[in-house]
Image: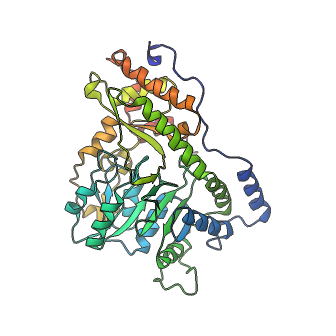
Amino acid sequence: MKLAIRGGSPIRTRPFTAWPIYDGREAAGLQSVLESRNWGGYPCPNDLARELGRQFAAHHGASYGVAVTNGTVSLELVLQAADIGYGDEVIVPAYTWEGTAAAVLFSGATPVFVDVDPSSYCLDARLIEEAITPRTRAIIPVHLGFRFADMDAIMEIADRHNLFVLEDCAHAHGGRWREKGAGSIGHAGSFSFQTSKLMTAGEGGMVTTNDIELADQVIRLANCGRPPRRETSGQPALGHNYRMTEFQASILLAQLERLEEQTLLRETLATSFERSLNGVTGISLLPRDPRITRQASYHYVFKYHPESLGGIDRDTFVAALKAEGIPCDGRFYEAVYRSSLFEFAAEKFPAWAAGRHDFSCPVAERAGYEESVWLPHQIFLGTETDVADLAAAIIKVLENIEELSGYEDERIRTQRMSRAQRALLEAKPPY
């Protein structure tokens, strides 16, 4: 069967489920906010933002939820509220979105990159202690793709070394570890509501915590330094305006109503997909961890093994899979310390200029540049036919991989570019 990238017929010609999903609930909520003339984020939290924080926290088993402008900001605000700043080090996984490490820099601290576990692509808890120094104050485990970091081991290490744990849950809305919701296990959690995420208002973020003083300080920092309650005991602080609008909160309240249903559907179809690919040569699936008791699947990630496929590289495989009608990505994330999006003038961040830069994280580098393939979550919000087409396309490319030998054109070269380079090529003029 000739591959589509070589002129054959693609497996899939129909689009998959469109994202974001919306219905009359979002429309009614937006209309209600419009007519109320109460649109903004002040007073903070405003009515719907307060209700969103309450419901979202309850859904994840946390006591408090604070709605803010985006997920990077939510990370930064928590670090600042925990009094983590210049002179401090924060352990972060080397394989994640660059914003995780950027938030550490924005708070004035130094990110220390630790490699990820090859079985989950999440922070490898076995490597944390060797990275701890007298300056280490916090750990940011990232629940990546559709797996959790090992929160049992991470919390045990944090307790022994008196470290603050901030869960980056940008991929984990609705997920549970040993029946504990994402963002309720560490000292705080950070969620993103950016367009591609499992809940979205285009942009937005959420901080979850069981510590009322921390929640108060996050609100203070997001609300121009204003204390949220008369009883607030946190230190005065110079704050930003990082408030969520009522339009965003109204959309997210509707999105939250369907989160559990969507979570279960993704899990059902992902399980079916896995059954179709068990034992297929050339790829491997990330093993399931039984401690994940509710599976949040932001993207489904599997491993591609070029050494067993005649040396055809991952990016060529991804290009061939796209030609079969399957949305996917290879260099979705990179090893952060090598990423073009993590290039900046070091002197702008004194903590970074004075910190260590000799990071070597081979699992993260292999994942970013050779091995990982990412499938967007909306594929798993359709039908069994959708995942059957997905599996058939993967198998087709693998069984005809020799057709890709020597394949090289402008499409592949563009695919191999970094995300920043590709964005520049595709971007519209800013003015």
Q: Please tell me which residue lies in front, 195 or 372.
A: 372
Residue located at (63% from left, 51% from top) = 258
Q: Quadrant of the N terminus?
A: top left
**Which image quadrant is residue 250 in?**
bottom right
Residue 346 placement (x, y as % from top left): 31, 58
Residue 101 placement (x, y as % from top left): 37, 57
As drawn, is 101 to the left or to the right of 74?
left
Residue located at (53% from left, 59% from top) = 70
Q: Please tell me which residue lies in front, 290 or 418.
A: 290
Residue 214 seen from this side: yes
Residue 251 placement (x, y as % from top left): 66, 55
Residue located at (28% from left, 53% from top) = 124
As drawn, is 187 to the left or to the right of 29?
left
Q: Is residue 8 above or below residue 364?
A: above
Q: Quadrant of the C terminus?
A: top right
Residue 242 seen from this side: no
